[in-house]
Image (cartoon, rainbow, N blue to C red):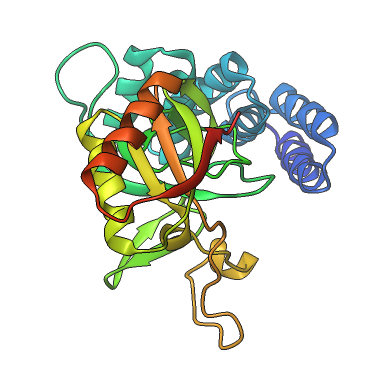
Amino acid sequence: MSDATEAEAERLVGQGIALREAGDLEGAAMAYRRAIEFAPDWSAPHYNLGLLYKYQGRWPDSLAYNQRAAELAPDDQASWWNLGIAATALGNWAAARRAWAACGMEPPPGDGPPEYRFGKTPIRLDPDGDAEVVWATRLDPARARILSVPLPISSRNYGDVVLHDGAPNGYRVVHDKQYPVFDALMVLEPSPFRKYVIELATADSSCIDALIDVAGELGGAVEDWGRSTNILCAECSRGIPHHHDDAPGTPAHPHCGLAATNDTHAERIIREWLERKPGADLVRWYDAA
């Protein structure tokens, strides 16, 4: 490749990045493709095109370009990460396993979805919208199963398995330990649960704890939104939460969320709770859909 050709490819990649940041995704893609014409064996335009297609949800295209970028620059983990994410979105477990191994995370034995079980992690469900952050079990480098009951405004549910990005976008601190927040990209496996709202007639914490226990025993889940959810400023949400003198933590919702498979299941949980816990009471409960 001549110096002039190399310079033109570099110019086109720079142009593509600028166009992407300006929101002209089609223009960016055209610039990256032109760069590939000038420098077909340079990994950068392949990587950038694969990255662009990842955020557009064009998974076969993202997989193909990240695969080529990884072939051209096998020591560049960024291409392997995006390849693994695209492969996971497509259920191509052989490619996903190969990508995670290349990133130094040898997958567990088998040929299906790798079950690393990394532990709990926060997931931002709708990065471009309400940006609610919930807790989830991180199954592998790109999959997590939601453990929280998301707020009523969210279309996500307890038990959904989501595809998430690989780069942390903020942190949550629990007992002085920082947990990276990952942005959700799409739902891979919808859960069998429905979401219900319980408007409580009591704020007694022991009554709410009893409701949580009963739901767990009967195969459901309860989230006390008043205790578990706070409204954060954008800087806190996408960084490390810090103290605000004027807003020490405002509950985002005063009620509880219930995950149950259907109305009958929800009613059984509520009836058992009311019978078991003296002083328990509610105003009403309803399907959040």
Instruction: Look at the image and tell me in which quarter the N terminus lies.
Output: top right
Give how far across and how far down residue 45 sits, in percent: 65, 32
Is there any visible trace of residue 141 in the rendered image? no
Image quarter for residue 154? top right
Q: Quadrant of residue 231?
A: bottom right
For this rendering, which residue is in front, 51 or 4?
51
Instruction: Count the labels in the image.
Output: 0
Residue 131 left/right relative to 99: right
Q: Is residue 50 shown left or right of residue 28?
A: left
Could you tell me which residue is drawn at 45 percent across and 19 percent down? 87
Residue visible at 56% across and 83% down in the picture = 244
x and y, in percent, of residue 157 in the image: 48, 32
Question: What is the residue that sits farthest to the left in this orientation?
Answer: 109
What residue sits 43% from the left and 28% below the top? Answer: 160
Instruction: Say if 239 sits above or below 158 in the image.
Output: below
Residue 128 shows up from this direction: yes
Residue 288 position in % (x across, y down): 58, 33
Question: To which quarter of the image does residue 136 belong?
Answer: top left
Q: Which residue is more in the foreground, 231 or 242? A: 231
Answer above or below: position of 33 versus 257.
above
Frontmost residue, 13 versus 146 = 146
Q: Is residue 282 left or right of residue 214?
A: right
In the picture, the quarter occupied by the C terminus is top right
Q: Nearer the viewer, residue 240 or 82?
A: 240
User: Please, is residue 253 above or below residue 193 in the view?
Assistant: below
In this view, the residue farthest toward the bottom is 245
Position of residue 284 measured from the top left corner of the image (x, y, whole percent): 52, 41
